[in-house]
Amino acid sequence: PVMAAQRATRVAAHATAPPSAVKGNFVYSGRETLGEEDVREMVVQDARAASRPYDIHRDGFCMVPGVPTQVVDMYDKLEVERVYYKEVEELLKQQLGAKRVIPFDHIVRNKARLAEEVAATGNESGSTPFLSGVASIVHNDYTVRSGYSRAKQLLTPCCSPEAIEKALKGRFAIVNVWRPLATVEKDPLAMLSWELTQPEDVQTIKLVYTHREGEVYRVFPSDRHQWSYWSKMDPNEVLLFKTFDSETAPGVAQFALHSAFEISGQGDAPERQSVEVRSLVFFDDDAIDLAPAFRAPHLTPSPDSDSRVSLVDRKIMPQIPGQY
């Protein structure tokens, strides 16, 4: 069971922010117990004023402007599957040079709508499928190990063991496509460049579900961390970021630590609304025809339809110094 969070003392890491930046509160993990929080006030640079563009292969993330969608209602899971998944596939092929893209999960985030639905139904998940609040703790969705295990879990129902082994020997990644549904005024998403990340920043947490196991990284604060965000992102802008990459060559980002953050003084601004889609992304020609019958498991009757219900335990795993 998930332990209740304990907040540590808030520490001001920087006194002032330059004109192209804001100050904001970041919720890190404390080092003592699972569930302990260490909240830090940090300066967050506006990536729109960055001296160089961010690159998803080098930094782990990038922003793509001018990306409209044909989806009318992102809260309609079947329209998202029918229309938006195809748009995500084409976007990632275009932007990353991918040969095969398999969207396997999506979440819509709207704290206000969720609160209204919980109050009306008494169900902590609300009534809209895959609806959640913002993820306001610094984390990464996978570890350097669980990227492989998650890909294998997803492909097993529709691929032979031989096809899976061949696909996972080539280069593949798990990439998140994040889009606001209205101009972001509150709780924007911040990213940390791969070059500012070190193994001692993270600790592996094993997630035990009723039907599978996974791993994520919780993150400790560091003076090295220099966060970036795109101010006032609008619905025609999308953020792409890696949560796993099998490529381990120097200079290639394996993931990008990330978190929603509370802008100092954001007050009663409208709650952030956004949608994110996670996809398996394969770069080798051999994977072009991989898993043609795949359907995202959370869209079928299965424990994957709501991980908040199927999660039964979390465990801190031993960390080898100097290794992720």
Image: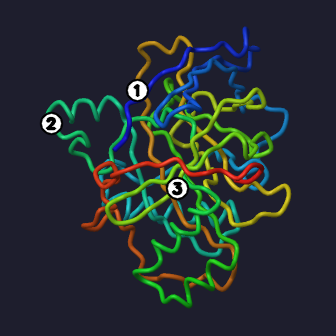
Of badges 1 and 2, the one in the foreground is 2
Q: Amino acid at mark 2?
A: Gly
Q: Residue at x 51, y 44 (%)?
A: 179
Count the marks: how many?
3
Q: Is residue 153 above or below residue 160?
A: above
Of badges 1 and 3, the one in the foreground is 3
Q: CA distance from mark 2 to mark 3?
A: 30 Å
The mark nearer the N terminus, 2 or 3, is 2
User: Badge 1 local density, few (<14 within 10 Å), some, or many (20+)?
Assistant: some
Answer left or right for 116 relative to 247. Answer: left
* SS for callout 1: loop
Q: Residue at x 51, y 88 (%)?
A: 161
Q: Amino acid at mark 3?
A: Glu
Question: Which residue corresponds to mark 3?
Answer: 215
Quarter-of-image position of residue 229? top right
Of 89 and 26, nearer the camera is 26
Q: Report if the CB atoms under discs 2 and 3 are less than 8 Å apart.
A: no
User: Badge 3 local density, few (<14 within 10 Å), some, or many (20+)?
Assistant: many
Question: Which residue corresponds to mark 2?
Answer: 122
Q: CA distance from mark 1 to mark 3?
A: 29 Å
Q: Is residue 77 above or below residue 11?
A: below
* SS for callout 3: strand
Residue 110: percent from left, percent from top:
37, 35
Q: Name the disc covering residue 271, or none.
A: 1
The mark nearer the N terminus, 1 or 2, is 2
Residue 202: percent from left, percent from top:
65, 43
